[in-house]
Image (cartoon, rainbow, N blue to C red):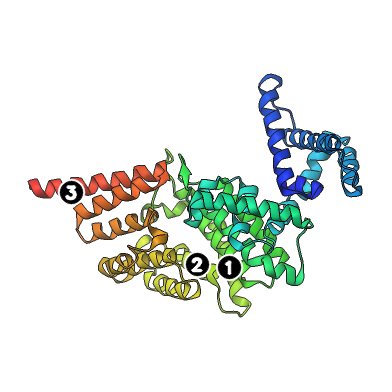
Amino acid sequence: MIASLVRMVRDVGLAEELAQDALVAALERWPDAGVPENPGAWLMVTAKRRAIDRIRRRQRLEVKHDEIARDLAFRQEAAVSDLEAALDDDIGDDLLGLVFTACHPVRSAEARVALTLRLLCGLTTDEIARAFLVPEPTVAQRMLRAKRTLANAGLAFEIPRGVDRAARLGTVLEVIYLVFNEGYLATSGDDWTRPTLCEEALRLGRVLAELTPDESEVHGLVALMEIQASRLGARVGPDGEPVLLPAQNRARWDQLLIQRGLAALARAEALGERLGPYALQAEIAACHARALTAQDTDWISIAAFYQALALATPSPVVELNRAVAVGMAFGASAGLELVDALAHDPMLRSYHLLPSVRGDLLEKLGRLAEASAEFERAAALTRNARERTLLLDRANVCRGRVDALSTG
């Protein structure tokens, strides 16, 4: 809805308000009148009517606003089924156009990503803040300033071409990547995953790959998402409980998505460029996808890919993932040494996966009391209910083994 409204009113903030007004109207009317046959079209018609009302109420005399009002009035008179069909026809370009508009370089990269995550996927400010590992007020200010800047700049709602597209492409890829990550491992809530976000990110990635067939990193990102998405069905148990990678039933991995991912990775490699961060992560995912069992995983290659990734994009999160791979390839002691070097990194101070990884390595080394404490610390930091339960269960298992050893 927001994407389609932005195309019409050319104002991100106004489009968001109109969409919210339409949803409020639905909440007020549908419980009594029932859900309409075409709810999406009903919402769009309502939002357009609100747009016309606002324009008339403010008595905007500028030619541009008059043209918008006439256009909206004309569109409003179309049949509901026609509106729904038009929405289906245009939605791909509308959403991608919204991403490129919100990612305009008039704002900082951080502000662009935050605004797009909010508009495109409805992620909360808290979820975005945790994705960036920054305080929530910082993200809120970034989004507010970004909206004002876009409105004041009067930017065209479009998918840019040439140099303009290249200038925004990196941020667009980051947005899609973060959307997928939020779906793959939900920041908060009662569910371990949010598959609809993964599907949305995948769809946008596929559209972008068709628009930019010569961009290696676009294909790399699509490859990464396809392969990771193949495991979604195996990552949760019958009751929605998390299932970690070593325990997953690989027969439940979606082979079609794996083959699509490997094909996209081959396209990235065939372009003859040095592999970028997304393609390197896709290579790591491919190592897992090619292993018939957890024991067959080529952890030495994965550790090498993480080393290359750390050189390409230095980050404490990448180093933490590299520590996991090193621990699997060369022993838990080697992995723990890398993790301990990250213990005082300010970016990871509230990052629950740091104590989680440390607890896993300590458990493998038989340091069970320390492992239990780390799992409990990780559980206190996570906002995801499923993950908290998993971590507390692991803490209890370690504590139980300590008790058994002491009594034995």
The residues tagged by marks 3 and 2 sit, at their Cα atoms, a distance apart of: 36 Å
Q: Position of residue 202 (x, y in %)?
A: 61, 55
Left-right relation of 238 to 337:
right
Q: Position of residue 210 (x, y in %)?
A: 71, 64
Check disc 2: other Cα within 10 Å, few if <14, some if 14-19, many if 20+.
many
Q: Pick whichever, 221 or 255, lies toward us.
A: 221
Residue 167 lies, with reference to residue 197, above or below; the image says below
Q: Amino acid at mark 3?
A: Arg
Q: Residue at x 69, y 29 (%)?
A: 26
Check disc 3: other Cα within 10 Å, few if <14, some if 14-19, many if 20+.
some
Q: Which residue is mark 2?
A: 281
Q: Which mark is residue 55?
A: none
Secondary structure beneath label 2? helix
Q: Pick whichever, 205 or 309, lies toward us.
A: 309
Q: Which mark is residue 401?
A: 3
Q: Which residue is mark 1?
A: 220
Q: Residue at x 52, y 66 (%)?
A: 282
Secondary structure beneath label 1? helix
Q: Residue at x 46, y 76 (%)?
A: 311
Q: Amino acid at mark 1?
A: Gly
Of the two numbered discs 3 and 2 on the same chain, state the one appearing first in sequence: 2
Secondary structure beneath label 3? helix
Q: Amino acid at mark 2?
A: Gln
The residues tagged by marks 2 and 1 sit, at their Cα atoms, a distance apart of: 8 Å
Of the two numbered discs 1 and 3 on the same chain, state the one appearing first in sequence: 1
Question: Where is the N terminus found, in terms of image quarters?
Answer: top right
Of the two numbered discs 2 and 1 on the same chain, state the one appearing first in sequence: 1
Q: Position of residue 23 (x, y in %)?
A: 68, 33
